[in-house]
Image (spheres, helix red, strand yellow):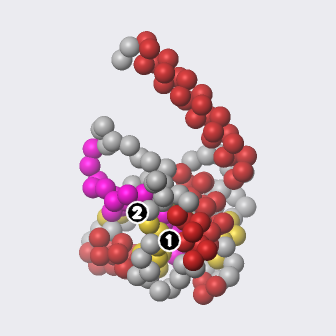
Amino acid sequence: MSDVDVEKIAMLLRERNGIDAKIAAIIQRPMTAGHLGEWIVAQVFGIALETSAVASAVDGRFTSGPLRGRTVNAKWYLKREGLLDVTVRTQPDYYLVLTGPVSPAASSRGGTRPWCIESVYLFDAEQLLAELRTRGVRIGVASSVRAAQWAAAEIYPSANNPILPVSPEQAELLRLFALR
């Protein structure tokens, strides 16, 4: 890498830090995929977030609709690689997962992770945990979830999981985050 490349990277990071600060001012938390994902699902799906960002396993509760009062753990994966961070000790009622494009769990060399939302999934935590245990999957930060489970849990853009219908207004908000 040349000195020119180092200078370019430093300049781009200064620009990114400025953008991240603007986003943090809106969401009232540091700009990370986790915090921003929680904020997006709160806005789109009517979730009251926990006051502390370090609450174990539960990010908030649905405030209306068929899941009113139920707990949720929100995730935003910039690529859907078939892995999900699943907790065992303290369990939410649901995992609400935003993902970017489908991608194999492979080397990221030469690739990008665009900040976008292509799909949204709702997993019943108890059911998912039981299915993973039946398959003998290691439960934790990178639990392997089968493609069929992802498909069954999809609520946007396809409405495969009827537990949480996505309204046209919610779909329009989610489309704002699509790659153009």
Residue name at image x 66 percent, y 46 percent: 23
Residue name at image x 42 percent, y 57 percent: 100
Asked if 152 appears above or below 143 in the picture, the reply is below
Asked if 113 appears above or below 82 in the picture, the reply is above
Residue name at image x 53 percent, y 23 percent: 10
Q: CA distance from mark 2 to mark 1?
A: 9 Å
Q: Main secondary structure of the magenta part?
A: loop
Q: Residues within 10 Å of mark 1 (few under 14, many from 20)?
A: many
**Membership of 148 in magenta stretch:** no
Secondary structure found at label 1 = strand
Name the kind of residue labelled 1 in the image. Answer: Tyr
Relative image position of residue 123 (x, y in whole percent): 45, 76
Relative image position of residue 120 (x, y in whole percent): 47, 69
**Membership of 100 in magenta stretch:** yes
Asked if 121 appears above or below 4 in the picture, the reply is below
Quadrant position of residue 146: bottom left
Q: Residues within 10 Å of mark 2 (few under 14, many from 20)?
A: some
Secondary structure found at label 2 = strand
Residue beneath label 2, please? 84
Apparent side of residue 13 relative to residue 4 in the rendered image (left or right): right
**Range of magenta residues:** 80-107
Relative image position of residue 31 (x, y in whole percent): 61, 46
Asked if 9 appears above or below 88 in the picture, the reply is above
- Which of pointers 2 and 1 lies earlier in the amino acid sequence? 2
Q: Is residue 80 visible?
A: yes
Instruction: Please name whichever residue, 164 or 82, is drawn nearer the observer in this view of the structure.
Output: 164
Disc 2 to disc 1: CB gap under 8 Å: yes
Relative image position of residue 165 (x, y in whole percent): 53, 82
Residue 2: numbered disc: none
Residue 95: numbered disc: 1
Instruction: Please name whichever residue, 165 or 53, is drawn nearer the observer in this view of the structure.
Output: 165
